[in-house]
Amino acid sequence: MAEDNFFERVYTIARQIPYGKVTSYGAIAKALGTSRSARMVGWAMNACHNMDDIPAHRVVNKKGLLTGKHHFDGTNLMQQLLESEGIEVVDNQIIDLEKHFWTPEIEF
């Protein structure tokens, strides 16, 4: 059950990512107070692909790479969703990551 609770906490943060912004697996893990669990954040994001209220396309790796893109239907859906929000992507990497990066904060 602890894993389900962790996943729900990840989703709570992911739902807060603003339109036109991205964050990283590690930033979400850090906000949860579990900075070494970026991989588990990735697992949570992989498990949410049928949940329409979670903008999973806005979660990338720390370098801005679209590492989760193979979990989206279609070959370029993740990139298309990001570009529709004004985020430029070249070779599966976000251009000007610092400009688009959102740092999550969680209140305990």
Image (tube, rainbow, N blue to C red):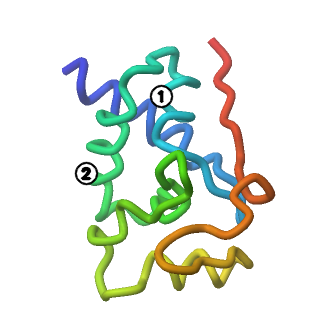
Q: Note whether 51 is above or below 102 in the view shown.
A: below
Give the x, y percent position of residue 70.
Answer: 28, 71
Q: Is mark 1 in CB contact (under 8 Å) with mark 2?
A: no
Name the foreground residue: 67 vs 80.
Answer: 67
Q: Name the residue under label 1.
A: 29
Residue 7, quarter of picture: top left
Residue at x-position 47% and y-position 50%:
61
Give the x, y percent position of residue 15.
Answer: 56, 49
Q: In which quarter of the image is the N terminus?
A: top left
- 97 to the left or right of 57: right
Q: What element carries label 2?
A: helix
Say few, some or many: other residues with alpha carbon within 10 Å of mark 1 (under 14 / 14 to 19 / 20 or more).
Answer: many
- 75 to the left or right of 92: left
Closer to the N terminus: mark 1 or mark 2?
Answer: 1
Q: Name the residue under label 2.
A: 47
Residue at x-position 46% and y-position 41%:
25
Give the x, y percent position of residue 71.
Answer: 27, 68
Which amino acid is tagged 2? Ala
Residue at x-position 36% and y-position 25%:
37
Judge whether residue 53 can be spotted in this image: no
Q: Which mark, by number, is residue 53?
A: none
Give the x, y percent position of residue 17.
Answer: 64, 51
Name the foreground residue: 16 vs 31.
Answer: 31
Which amino acid is tagged 1? Ala
Name the foreground residue: 27 vs 106.
Answer: 27
CA distance separating discs 1 and 2: 16 Å
Q: Is mark 1 on a helix, strand or loop?
A: helix
Q: Which-is-in-front pick, marks 1 and 2?
A: 1
Residue at x-position 69% and y-position 74%:
87
